[in-house]
Amino acid sequence: MSKTVVTPERFSEYFKLNSNIDFEFCNIYAKQDIPLFLDPYGISAIKSDWSKTCETHIKTYFQYLVDSIKSGDKKVIAKLLNAFHEVNEVGLGYSLNQPSGRGIGHKQAKEIQEAFENSVAAKSGDIKDIADCALMIPGINRDKISDITSNILKGQLIEFTQEVCKRYKIPMKKVPVNNVFDYGTFEFISYYAELPVVYESPKILLPKAGVRSDPQLSKDKYYRNFVLEFLRAEHHHAGDSLSTVLKNGKLVVRIADLKAKYPIGTDFLYQFSKDNPKVLEKFKSELRRTALNEATKPVLIPKIKILTASERIKFLSDIPVGTKDATNFHKLSFDNLIHIFGDRLSNADSEVKINDGRKRIDIVFDNSEKDGFFNKLNTLHHIQCPKIFVECKNYGREIGNPEIDQLVGRFSKARGHFGILLCRSVENNATMVNRCKDVFHEGKGYVIVLDDIDVNILLKFKELEEENRIDEFMSKKLDEIIM
């Protein structure tokens, strides 16, 4: 089955801005995240009063955090680190082709807090800035650095957004913003701010110069390009047991041998950096240099990473059940269903309002299939379903009649009478099927329930390109209800 490629609508297109302008802001997608990263070194490289303020705020934040760790003030530590979540307003993340569920969730925030509190580097005060944090704290990688930077600079990024909107006459609305760090009181505050609103979602814009497709700030790049190269030179000069003499008499030190002797790890990187501070400073100097290099500027049509079934299954299993992670479950489910059903369904949309805004549907598709399961709903089973409705329930308990009735309440003669209810698990399949049968026998419509196990099976079928088995699987789910 061929794959339909649709170019997502951009922020500039939504507001009908001149397409010939080379915008100074990252032209994010209107309704989806874009897999790019906010780079603190890119912010610093702008060399404006605004960027200098941002740089000062980052240093101040981390100094406050390290001081709190050294003094053992767990209340302040928790306050500072619990704010490290994905800032949805900035539009950076993975939900286009890599799930934004990989942002910092509540479980990961707790793990990061423990990592900071237990870090020798943090306790000793050797963490001076965000680069040290990325290299010496477990669990901090490029997407987490992007989230952390977005959180620390949220107030400054709101100011940047307001300036951009004034310059291009982009309309703004007063909306609530939460978890903005006030550098005067050292507290997180909430307030109302003027921001552009796209499809009812407020947006915070980022300077294009501060956004990267592939930031240089990473443990792997520091380890591979600086640490190992330094160690190779050291062992080559010493001519010790890690040195190998080739047949031509040339002395070499193999990277594979170095990796075996010095495996990458935060404890190792911390001790190495403490023993060799000039190497760490050289790395930071390179970060500053490359941030100024035009070649490192982001390509705003990023390369799409096709996730494997195993990666998608792992992302799904990593999302905790419960209302706190309902948004991550919804975003990942939205992406997975688009991937699984391909061009069977089109015009995917989320958080769709109906009945003059009195009701909302989690996910809606157009039924565009010319052959296969969704087509046969119309032609074979005579089920009216121009739209396919999906509700997502990230519950830690069994869903029941109220959740099914909620989905049925979205059905209508014009919209159709078929929907899918996504949940995390089904404890009693027979009971669940009977609930769906009751809807069918009462003439209210058709509801199919899919849990994580079902979605995992469909993802595997998709990866194996067994499209017929996807249709067969869905047909069996329908047969359980109507037979």
Image: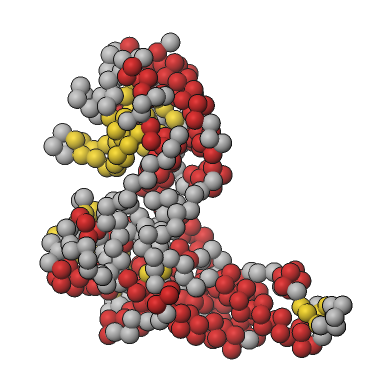
- Left/right placement of residue 451 relative to residue 223 reads left
Q: Quadrant of the C terminus?
A: top left
Q: Is residue 347 above or below residue 54?
A: above
Looking at the rendering, in which quadrant would you find the N terminus? top left
Residue 259 percent across, percent down from the top left: 71, 70
Residue in the foreground of this view, choosing between 45 and 201: 45
Q: Position of residue 343 (x, y in %)?
A: 38, 36
Q: Is residue 225 visible?
A: yes
Place of residue 169 in the rendered image (x, y in percent of width and height, measured from the top left) = 12, 67
Residue at point 54%, 86% (across, down): 281
Q: Quadrant of residue 291?
A: bottom left
Q: Position of residue 468 (x, y in %)?
A: 50, 26
| Residue at (34, 74) in percent of width and height | 209
Which of the 4 quarters of the picture holds residue 371? top left
Q: Along the line of sight, which residue is nearer the eye, 23 or 203?
A: 23
**Point 36% across, 77% down: residue:** 43
What residue is shown at x 47% (from left), y 67% (from top)?
Answer: 214
Q: Is residue 476 above or below residue 28?
A: above
| Quadrant of the image occupied by residue 228 | bottom right
Residue 271 makes an appearance in the image: no
